[in-house]
Structures are given as structure tokens and as C-alpha cells.
Image (tube, grey):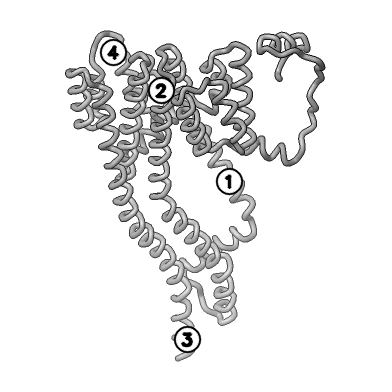
Amino acid sequence: MDALSGDEVTAKLRVMGYMATHIALASRGIKVGDFAERIRPIKQQDLIVFYFQLSNLIGAGIPILTALKTIETQVEHRKLKKVIGDTRRSIEAGSLFSASLDRYAGIFGKLFISMVKAGEESGRLDKVLRSYAAYAEGQQELREKVKGALFYPAILFIASIIVILFIVTFLIPQFVDLFSKAGLRLPFITQMLYTAGLMLKNYWYFFMLFLAALIFSAKQYARTKTGRLYCDRLLLKIPVVGVLMRKVYVSRFSRTLATLQISGVSILQSLDITKEVIGNKVMSEVVFKARQAVEQGQKISDPLKVSKEFPLDAVEMIAVGEETGNLEEMLNKIADFYDMSIGFAVKKLTVIIEPVFLVIMGSIIAFIMASMLIPVFDMVKLLRH
């Protein structure tokens, strides 16, 4: 148990209904296996299973402490087991479930904690947990779709880079040595690739350092407010990819806002949370303007329409939902529609990326092979003479 002193431990145990017979400091030694287990991140799939287990147990009428204890005994991930155990002990000591989760906001996220708090206040914790479990599962499926679309092109890209490096650093130098001994004058492109290959082979560590510095600088710039805004705006403008990502953000906005509203979270707080979890700075600013408009008594759909960042059909459906008083239902319909649309967009992206990528990489390799074949033709002409 975490505490500042032995007396605090005794007090905490007394509140939980226990009597301390012996108190000692825990050992600070960490075994290699324990250390590896602690640094292993908690995957989203592990959390989704936890959400479903908890919602089912609470829905069956089992008290929160018993439910957490039951899940704790079943969880294999040691880090997640510790988090659940700490949360359970915090509740036993008198804290609310939402306040106990707040200690691990980096793991569970602001959205889940806010929904749990709303569920506690409204007395509908079981429904809120079930709603969030379904939401988390849907978001995970969405992420897997996008990752699946980019997996094969990424493999092709890595394989092509390896082939190109092998040709430039190994094959071309051997050809150049052969041509030099034959007294042939190398074409400019062959000489250029030969020089590039030698530099890569002899000074590869400089290139690695430069690449690492470039990636680090790009990440640092992307973390700044200006850099994040620029990168997110650029992402939305990329052909095909930008269309797909916009659909992902619209779906995430609609599903998150609907889930929060169904859970009883106020509209202003819902928009604040949605702004944080939408995942794109450009879209987040639009949601922030919508939040300001609602605070002034206006509709959500008005600033969304003015921004032109949200598709017109989604904005019109939100406006209809506001007029009829069925905003949550309409938001869920928008999310369902765009989830289906994302599936088609992913297939389209895969169909487009593969041939384009093969043409680009094929052209690069053809250019390299041409730089090797031109001197061969020159050698053949020399031998004929």
C-alpha cells in the first residue's frame, strides 16, 4: 500500500475494516522479469476486455468492489492487475470509482473517467460501462482497418529500400571496378550512384545520425501548437488519404459525442472531451468553436457548417437531430454511416496505393539498372571494334 508513514497505512486499513498486525517497508529490489513486465505497455485489447468484463459484472448486480476483485484475479497482464488492485483498494478506502481511476488517467483516458463519473451521478453506471465498452471496441476496429490498409504498402516500401541499398552499395561498386579495369568511361548516372553507394557504405553512421536528428526534429516540431496544426492540416489535404482520415475524425466525433450524451454528460463537457479525443488539431478547433457557440445559446451545426471541415451531409444530419431533439440517435447514425464508408475508403486506398507504389519503386530500380546496363552496352561495342 502506498502511504507516507506507517500510521497512514494503519488508518487506511482501519477504514477498510482491517487491523494492522505488522507494517514494513516494501523491498525496492526489482527482478529482470518484473521490470520487463512493468515496462510492457497495456494494450487497447486488454482494456477493452476489462471494460466488457466490468460492464457485465456490474450489469449483473455485482458490487463494484467484488467485480474489480474478480477481474483482478483473472487478468494476466501484471501491470493492469496492479492498476485494478490499486483502484479497488482506493475505493475500499472511501474514494469514488471515478476518483480512483483519475490516478491512472494516462491509461484509461479522460473520456472513460468522465463517463464513469456521469454514471455514478446518474446511477446508470452499468449502462455507461456497456456503452463505453462498445465504443472502445468500435474505435479499435476502426484503427485496425486503417493499419491494415497501410501494412502491405509499408512492407513493400521496406523491401524496396533493402533491394535498392543492396544494389547501390554492393552490385554497382563491383560493376564499376570491372568497367574501370576495362578502361571504360562511366556515364554520369553510374558515377553518381557509385559515389552515393560509397558514401553510404563508408559513412553510414553519419546518415543514421542525420536521419535520427531529422526524425527527432520533426517530432519536436509536431508537438508544438503551430507544428501540430500544420501537420494535421497537411494530412487532411493529401489526396485519398486525407478523405479517409476526415471520415475517421467525423466518425470519432459523432460516436464520442453520442456516447457522452447518452451517458448523461452535459453538452459543454461532452464537447470539451470530444475536442481532446478527436485526434486532429484542425477538427479540434472546429469543435472548440462549436462549444463556444453552444455556450452562447447557438446550435452545434452552425459553426461546423461555417468551418467547411465537416462534410455537409454530416452537418445537415446533426442539424436535423438538434431540431427534432434526437441528437444522440442522429450522431450514432452518422458514425455508423461513416464507419461503413471508411471500410470502402480503405479498400479504395489499398487498390490505389499498391500499383502507384509499385510504379514508383519499379521506376527507381529501373533507373539504377539502366545505370549498370549502359556501361555494359559500351563494353560490348568496344569488344566488337
Disc ID at residue 308? none
Q: CA distance from mark 3 to mark 4?
A: 81 Å
Q: Work out whether residue 208 can be spotted.
A: yes
Q: Which mark is residue 294?
A: 4
Cα–Cα span, label 2 and label 4 = 24 Å
Q: For residue 65, what is the image quadrant? A: top right
- Which element is circle 4 on? helix
Q: Height in image: 362 above or below 106?
A: below
Viewer-nearest residue: 56 or 216: 56
Circle nearer the N terminus (3, 4):
4
Q: Nearer the viewer, residue 28 or 381?
A: 28
Of the two numbered discs 2 and 4 on the same chain, state the one appearing first in sequence. 2
Foreground mark, 3 or 1? 1
**Pointer 3 with pointer 2, Cβ within 8 A:** no
Q: Secondary structure at mark 2?
A: helix
Instruction: Tell me the SS state at disc 1.
Output: helix
Left or right side of 151 for 206 = right
Res 128 label: 2
Callout 1–callout 2 Cβ contact below 8 Å: no
Residue at 35% over, 62% down: 359
- Which residue does the numbered mark 1 point to in the structure image? 210
